[in-house]
Amino acid sequence: MESAIQKYFENKTVFLTGGTGFLGKVIVEKLLRTTEVKRIYLLIRPKRGVEIQERISEWSKDSVFELLLKSKSDALQRVCPIAGDCLEPDLGISDTDRRLLASEVQIVLHGAATVRFNEPLHVALAINTRATRLMVQLGKQMVNLEAFVHVSTAFSNCIIYHVKEKFYPEHLTCSSDKVLGVSELLSDELIDNMTPTLLGSHPNSYTYTKALAEDVILREGSDLPICIFRPAVIIASHKEPISGWIDNLYGPIAILFGVARGVLRIATIDVKAQASLVPVDYCANLALACAWKTAQTDERQSDPIIYQLAPTEDNSLTHGEFKDYALDGRMQCPLTKMVWYPFFHCITTMWLFPIAAFFYHTLPAYIFDLALYLSGRKPRLVKVYQKIHKTLGILGPFSSKSWYFDMHNTNKMRELMSEQDRRLYDFDMASISWKEYFEKALLGMRLYLGQDPPTSESIAHGLRVIKRLKMWHHLLQVILGCIAAFIVWSLIRVVV
C-alpha cells in the first residue's frame, strides 16, 4: 500500500538542480526507488567532450544506484538531463527547454550550489544567490507548480549561535536585490575586492551568499508554494541506499580520511564543542517530505516555512566524540595505504597551531619528500600539507564553537506523517546511534574513498600495515624522548 508521500509523487514531474552532487544523487535514487515519479528533469552543466545524457548513463556504474537498478533496471530512463549552468545569466537553459519546464514541472528541488568556503565572491554570488533568483523567476512561469524546495544550509546564519526556523535579513550588510544589482554593474575584480565589506560578520563567501539566497526567497518567492530546507553539515549515508556511502572529500569525512591515512595529525578543534552533522539519506528524505508538505498547504504563508535538520539536544555529538570514533577505526577497518600510524591531537590555542603543525606536519613532509626525490619519484607531501593547513584555517571557526538549531517545524511535520512515511522517509535525528553510525561510515570511507574492498583479506592486510607502522611510531617516540632528555640533561649540566 502506498504511503501519503509515495502517492503524492506518483506521476509527478520534478525539476532538480544540483542532481549530480552528493545530496542530489541520493534524492534522485530515493525518488526513483520508492515512488512512481513520472519524470525527473536534471539541470546538468555541459562538459567538453561529454554529452549530458552520457553523464546520466554513467550512473549505472555508480554504487549508489546499485540497489535501485536491481529492482528497477530501467529506472534511470525517467531521468532527463537539461543542459544548463548556474554561472550563466539565464541559467544556460535554452528557450525550448525553458518552455518544456514551464509547462510540465510540478515540483522544484533547487539544490545547486558551490560549497567551497573560499570561493571568490563573484562566483559564489552567481551560483548561490543569482541562480536562486533565476530559479524563482522560472518557478513563476511554471503553470502547474505545486512545491518549490530551496536547499540552503543551517549555517547560513552562523553569526548567531541559536538559529531558529526563521529569516534573519537584519544580519545582512545589504539586501539581496542591492547586492545583485551592484554585481551586475561592477567587474568581478571589484566585487571580490568588496568581499570584506559585504560579508560583514560572515566568515566566508559560502555562508554569506546562502544567506543572501534566503533573502531572495523571502523577497521574491513568497507568492510561490515555496519552503526552505536547512541541513547541517551533510555526511555519509546512514541506512540508504547503502550504509556509509560517500563520494567526496568535503568536511568531516575529509578529516576522518586524513586521520586514517596517517596524514592529518593535528587541528584546531574544541573537543567540547558540538558537531552539527547529518547523514545524507536523512537530508534526502526530509527534502522530499518538505515538497509533500508544501504542496498540502492550501494557503500561502506570509513568509515561506523553514525546516532545519541537525542533531537533537538529547542525542548530540561533540567534536571529541567524533575524534574518538575516528581513532576507533584504526584497528576496526584500517586502510591498506597509510603514510604513518594514525593519531590525532586537537588544540584550541591558535598561536600554538603553527608551531605544532611544523613538527607534526611540515617537517615530516620535507623528510618524506626528500626520500621520494632521492628515490626518483616526484615530491608531493609538502604541497598536500599546504592545502590541508589552508583548509583547516577555513574550517577553524566551525570546529571551535557550538550551534543550536531549532527544529520545531521539522518535528511538527514529522508528527503529521504516517507511521509508514516515517519509516520510508526517516529523518529522526534523535534515534541515531552515533557509535553504530560511525562504524558504518568508516567502512564506507575505506571502500568508497580509500578504494579498499570490504574483504577479510583486505582488512587483514590493513592490520599488518598498521601494526608495522605502530611499531615504528613508538620507536620514533622513544628516540625523540631520548633526544629531548639528552638536551635537557646537557642544559642542566651547563647551568650547574
Image: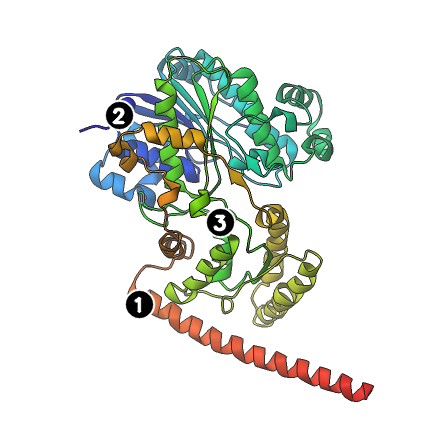
Circles 2 and 1: CB atoms closer than 8 Å: no
Q: Is residue 428 left or right of residue 403?
A: left
Give neighbour class at mark 1: few <14, some 14-19, many 20+ (Cα, 10 Å): few
Q: Which residue is mark 2?
A: 4
Q: Secondary structure at mark 1?
A: helix
The quarter of the picture where residue 26 lies is top left
Residue 222 or residue 36, whichever sits in front = 222
Q: Amino acid at mark 3?
A: Leu
Q: Is residue 230 left or right of residue 417?
A: right
Q: Which residue is mark 3?
A: 249
Q: Are marks 3 and 2 in contact (CB under 8 Å)?
A: no
Seen from this angle, which residue lies furthest left? 1
Q: Position of residue 307 (x, y in %)?
A: 45, 30
Looking at the rendered image, the disc whose residue lies closer to the viewer, 2 or 1, is 2
**Residue type (three-letter) at the residue carrying disc 2:** Ala
Residue 231 versus residue 182 in the image, above or below: below
Residue in front for this viewpoint, 332 or 404:
404
Q: Which residue is mark 1?
A: 457
